[in-house]
Amino acid sequence: MLFYEPLFLFLFAPAVYLLYLFFDAERGRRALILLLASVVFYGWSEPTFIFVVFASIALDLFVARRIGLSRYLEGRGDAADGEARRRWLALGVVSNLAILVYYKYTGFLALNLDALLRALTMPGVNIPQIALPIGVSFIVFEKITYLVDVYRGVTAPARGPLLYALYVFFFPKLLAGPIIKYHDIARQLEECPHADVDDFVTGFSRFMLGVVKKLLIADTMASGADLIFARDAATLGFVDAWAGVIFFTLQIYFDFSGYSDMAIGLARMFGFRLLENFNMPYIATSITDFWRRWHMSLTSWIREYLYFPLGGNRQGEARTYLNLWVCFLASGVWHGAAWTYVLWGAYNGVFLVLDRLFLVERLRGLPDWLSNIITMLVVMVGWTLFRATSLEQADAFLSLMSRPWTPSVVAIPPEYVVMAVIATGVCVAQRIALSFEGFDWAGAARRFAFASNSALALLFVAALAKGLADPFKPFIYFRF
């Protein structure tokens, strides 16, 4: 079930919302309604995996209680309970990572082991295909934040299984984030906030914006990217390769930020405030700046739950550079079980290290627009690795992109070009807007609110019509 499907828009969402409002005075029932709705929402697509998640939730709750008890006893002077607390945390983290490794990486590891064994003239291995559950990486990462938060004393163990299960299954952010840390939403889950008219108007406007970004822009760009990347690279030219990469660069931003808009908007309609996940990443003036703006919930998660535990920048410059690189290598692995993702993570890690060494200072000496162009070229080379289906295809595309004398051969439909220009214009407008620092953008937004919302509603209807007429294109991050 997708947010823009008729089943969701005209049956599921209205029914859940009306029930939520009907029990407005009963906080416990509101939480139960959201949990049941979220379980139905996820079970619609993943009826089997949902039982695995429930079993894992039960283990998390037990482990968190043991961690909390050990922390309490440790605070009373029992040093042995400090070690017990660490063991319980290790059990919880390893059990969650085991779910991720089994479903997401078993096939990849088996495939590479099979290739290695056969290269050594030894019998290979054959493991049956394991279906990848939707959103498994987001679910596992959020569950780990809960255990680590309890271990650090940032939050107390959940007051009951209903609240923790709602945190895991909350349907607006369930399938593709943003990644929500338990301590950021624990109070909201306990209060299960009242939803008012302002929440509905603000939330639904944000939801409509996400649908427009996904169906009108991202899906059109997806068709353009697929047209290029589906061809043999030997039949492409310089312009073709760059067109495919530009299409994908626009697709992944409007697709993923569109989903985040929908998630944040839906949550707001129920009175919940989720943290932002994007902040105009394509206006970045360095790779470091880019990662502060792109998928901010993942970057924040990596910083707090991987970079800091590795030592952060507290153990000398060499170790800091290694930690940065390892973190973004891990980010690449998190994104997918393929060598292209591993290389993409390593590539971004290298540029983050270069930024820290000298590159940021060099870029600051240039005009912002030029730093932005240089940064985007680096980003698009990375997106080439990300989109390629193999290392061989990535190498072929990068080679074509560096040879302007190779002629173009693909007839690109004009609607793809027009939409690419519009999407690029949106990103450029964000850059231009920064130059008007003293302008009252909030006041302008209020003055033009009616006109902009009316235009957004018309685009929303057009997006839904396009979504019903065109072949289905899933969100990119569902596979993660």
Image (tube, rainbow, N blue to C red):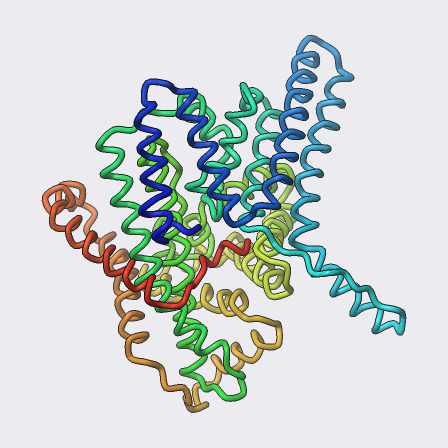
Q: Residue at x 50, y 54 (%)?
A: 478
Q: Position of residue 19 (x, y in %)?
A: 34, 30
Q: Position of residue 239 (x, y in %)?
A: 40, 83
Left or right: where 82 falls relative to 272: right
Q: Farthest residue to the right: give it.
A: 122
Q: Residue at x 65, y 34 (%)?
A: 55
Left or right: where 453 falls relative to 289: left
Left or right: where 373 falls relative to 201: right
Q: Residue at x 61, y 72 (%)?
A: 390
Left or right: where 243 falls relative to 90: left
Q: Residue at x 44, y 42 (%)?
A: 173
Nearest to the observer: residue 455 or residue 239: 455
So how many labels did they put on this image? 0
Q: Position of residue 84 (x, y in %)?
A: 75, 22
Compared with residue 271, is residue 216 higher up or lower down, i.e. above or below? below
Compared with residue 72, is residue 451 higher up or lower down, i.e. above or below? below
Q: Position of residue 22 (x, y in %)?
A: 31, 25
Q: Farthest residue to the top: give it.
A: 76
Answer with the quarter of the image where residue 424 lies.
Answer: bottom left
